[in-house]
């Protein structure tokens, strides 16, 4: 897979995934919506770490209970909108993975991380503001289930599965 970067995401439980994916389907521009609802943990790792990444994701999940998480509210992305996810446990896992690959991280992945589910992106500001208002009126903070971690080959459009690791 020479030259094709890897992405690391958190996976939701079935009910939460369906909820987030439905909202993404409603708000994300159809011609740009190539992937399903997810939380990106790292957006660009080199393909040379593929095997090591699988080992590390497996170590983070095998026999380990899922980290507690909650839907915390609506985030303004300027040209879109997202739902913020709070999870100290997921942040700790992300920090360990990022530290393991620190010399290879792009600036975006070195910056502070705010877990979220992007529901809309690359839209005019007024469209984003309207979506934000709708979501703020209907989204209620609540617990969500983080079911696992996954890695994906990024090919510009739909992602190709690399590995999937479920919590106990």
Image (spheres, helix red, strand yellow):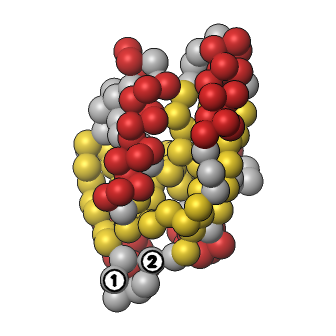
Query: Gap between marks 1 and 2, in whole Å?
Result: 7 Å
Q: For numbered disc 1, what is the local secondary structure?
A: loop
Q: Position of residue 67 (x, y in %)?
A: 52, 76
Mark 1 Cα-neighbour bin, 10 Å: few <14, some 14–19, many ≥20? few
Q: Position of residue 150 (x, y in %)?
A: 36, 59
Q: For numbered disc 2, what is the local secondary structure?
A: loop
Regarding residue 79, the answer to whether it shows in the image is no
Decide which of 137, 149 is in the foreground and name it. Answer: 137
> Quarter holding the N terminus?
top left
Q: Position of residue 64 (x, y in %)?
A: 41, 86
- Quickly name the residue at label 1: 168
Q: Give the quarter of the image for residue 158.
A: top left
Residue 92 position (above or below residue 132): below
Residue 66: numbered disc: 2
For residue 18, side relative to residue 87 (left or right):
left
**Residues at discs 1 and 2 in contact (Cβ within 8 Å):** yes
Q: Earlier in the sequence, mark 1 or mark 2?
A: 2
Residue located at (66% from left, 19% from top): 130
Residue located at (55% from left, 75% from top): 68
Q: Position of residue 115 (x, y in %)?
A: 61, 54
For residue 72, side relative to residue 22 (left or right):
right
> Quarter holding the C terminus?
bottom left
Decide which of 79, 153 is in the foreground and name it. Answer: 79
């Amino acid at each position: 897979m020479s030259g094709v970067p890897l992405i690391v995401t958190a996976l939701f439980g079935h009910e939460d995934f369906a909820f987030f994916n439905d909202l993404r389907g409603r708000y994300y521009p159809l011609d740009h919506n190539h992937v399903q609802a997810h939380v990106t943990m790292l957006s660009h790792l080199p393909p040379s770490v593929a095997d090591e990444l699988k080992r590390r994701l497996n170590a983070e999940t095998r026999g380990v209970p899922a980290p507690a998480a909650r839907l915390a509210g609506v985030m303004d992305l300027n040209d879109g909108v997202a739902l913020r996810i709070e999870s100290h446990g997921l942040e700790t896992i992300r920090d360990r993975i990022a530290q393991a690959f620190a010399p290879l991280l792009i600036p975006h992945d070195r910056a502070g991380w705010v877990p979220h589910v992007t529901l809309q992106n690359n839209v005019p500001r007024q469209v984003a503001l309207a979506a934000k208002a709708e979501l703020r009126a209907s989204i209620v903070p609540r617990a969500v289930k983080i079911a696992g971690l996954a890695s994906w080959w990024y090919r510009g459009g739909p992602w190709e599965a690399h590995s999937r690791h479920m919590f106990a």
